[in-house]
Image (tube, grey):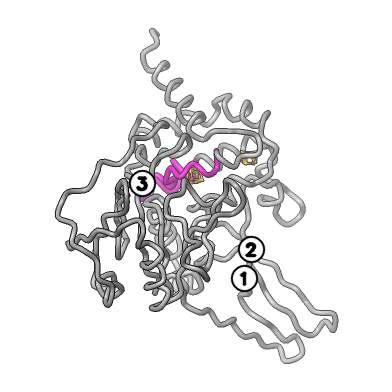
Amino acid sequence: MVQFYLEGERITEFVAHLMNRKTVYAPHRKGRKSFSFERTENAADVVLDYPRTMHSVKKYFLPPREELLTFDLKENDFETSDIPTCEAIFLGVHSYDLAAVGRLDYNFTVGSPERNYLTRRQDAIFIGVSFEPDKYHFSGSVGIRPEDNTGCDIFLTKLFDGYVLEVLTPTGQDLLEGLDLPAHEAGKPATGHFHQHIFVPQAKLSEIMESSYNNPVWEETADQCVGCGTCNLVCPTCYCFNVEENVDITVTKGNRERHWDSCMLRKFSEVAGGEVFRESLASRQRHRIFRKFKYISDQTGQPWCVGCGRCTAYCTAGISIVSIVNRLIGEYERAAVAPI
Ligand code: SF4
Ligand code: SF4
């Protein structure tokens, strides 16, 4: 693996170099405290040192709303919509968001591979960057360190005055052609530590979830929850969507669209006849957490939460996923040692 030194003062030059090669999506500042992945128009607007973006890069592969097909009722015909690939560089991606892309790759590949996601995703180039965990991150507890470069073509590790730039794939090597960077011989600095932890591995969590189906934590959390669905909409591994058909005013033509949906919304589990099979907020909270640490995890052995902290950071009611899980762990362990 080749390592270079990217001086802090040369970051704009580095971004401009990448922009000459391909479209670059990268974190940009939004307002005082927020950050967002955006198409880069000005290299100087890119921010590599940021806590988290509100939405992950998922939005480029699974857009919040997209057309699936158009139909003609007179001709009794339909045409599937063209899907362009994201042949672009995704710069400044944190390790947990890359891990989330890996989870989505699994979800959209098992069973019937899903054309739209996989087409958009296939030519993406990733340049990761290390991060300093804040009070919401806990990816270390699900096996994802800030310096984890899995899935990256290039990875940047923060130094005091710049970055160690590691070239990880031939694509990454090709991107640097024409950019003269000094070699970095020294090692990489240790990254920061996490302030939030889940203290048991996934195999144990699965067992704990199994025994927590009727735990009062679901009702108590539901008492605070307003059922807004924000936790799902900001989650990089949530992928549920709704499909709608729209017919134009002539009632001869229309389209079919899909848009992000949320299992925390009452309507999500409404079926034909008006039956809602997860009517209570408590059952929706349980379902959300079980989707992250039980249902898919039982099949894959991996947590489907990547510890980004978004659902806690942006929760309208201040509900913490780490607190819920740690409470379940604590009660499970106390029950295990309690005298019979
Ligand atoms: S973001 Fe918070 S308040 Fe909104 S549905 Fe999720 S847990 Fe409930
Ligand atoms: S469940 Fe919460 S912490 Fe886990 S990946 Fe989703 S948004 Fe991030």
Task: State the CA–CA distance, disc 3 to disc 2.
Answer: 26 Å
Task: State the CA–CA distance, disc 3 to disc 1.
Answer: 29 Å
Relative image position of residue 235 (x, y in whole percent): 53, 50
Tell whether position 308 is magenta.
yes
Label 1: few (<14), some or many (≥20) within 10 Å? some
Judged by depth in the image, the label closer to the viewer, 3 or 1, is 1
Task: State the CA–CA distance, disc 2 to disc 1.
Answer: 6 Å
Q: Are marks 3 and 1 in contact (CB under 8 Å)?
A: no
The residue that appears at 52% across and 71% down in the rendered structure is 41
User: Disc 2 residue type?
Assistant: His
Which residue of the protein is positioned furthest toward the bottom in this rendering?
75
174 or 275, which is in the foreground? 174
The part of the chain drawn in magenta is 290-312
User: Disc 3 residue type?
Assistant: Gln
- The answer to which of marks 3 and 2 sits earlier in the sequence is 2
48 or 338, which is in the foreground? 48
**Residue 70 lies in what quarter of the image?**
bottom right
Label 2: which secondary element: strand
Location of mark 3 (residue): 302
Location of mark 1 (residue): 66
Location of mark 2 (residue): 259
Relative image position of residue 46 (x, y in whole percent): 47, 60
Label 3: which secondary element: loop
